[in-house]
Image: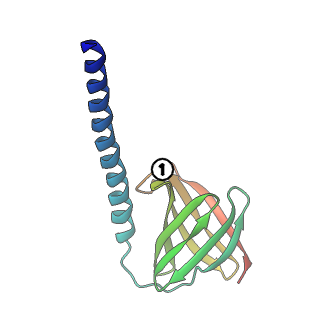
Amino acid sequence: MITSRLFLVSAAALLLLSGCSLQEKYARNEAAGAAWLKESPAPARANFEGIYYTPDWGTVTINQEDGNLTGSLAHYQLRGVVSGKTARLLLTDDYWTDYTMILTRKSSEKLSGAYSEGVPFSKDSSKPIVLHRITQ
């Protein structure tokens, strides 16, 4: 009986500690994403709003209010900022930023750039992406 109680207390303590560490991990991920977005302080000079398509990811919806972006890309929630004619995006699933993306407006019909896993964006491990507008 004492062994069972000791096991339950140990398991509860481990769960509590792992929960704190998980919360800290999520907080660090969120802080890194916010810091990366702030690295581009210039005012917005381009409009990224619209519905786009990319063969690798599917439909992309981007909403823009001033220099702030929100929307969705596949099953990810998208948020970001526009600095000049460049957008920096965080792609988040269940409060965890899985990808970072940098896009530039090539024309009124096309955005292009690259994405990488994690935060901050890594040019070394990035992959190219092109988004084609499907509606205004």
Q: What residue lies at 53% left-to-right and 53% top-to-bottom?
A: 126
47 lies left or right of 107 = left
Q: Is residue 62 above or below residue 25?
A: below
Which residue is situated farthest in the front direction here?
1
> Mark 1 = which residue?
124
Q: What residue lies at 49% left-to-right and 69% top-to-bottom?
A: 79
Tell me the kind of residue under disc 1.
Answer: Asp
Q: What residue lies at 46% left-to-right and 55% top-to-bottom?
A: 97
Location of residue 8 by image quarter = top left
Residue 13 horizontal/vertical position (percent)? 26, 31
Front in this rendered view, residue 27 or 117: 27
50 lies left or right of 116 = right
Front in this rendered view, residue 129 or 91: 91
Q: Is residue 90 above or below residue 96?
A: below
Marks counted in the figure total 1
Residue 85 horizontal/vertical position (percent)? 51, 80
Location of residue 105 by image quarter = bottom right
Q: Secondary structure at mark 1?
A: loop
Front in this rendered view, residue 5 or 128: 5
78 lies left or right of 109 = left
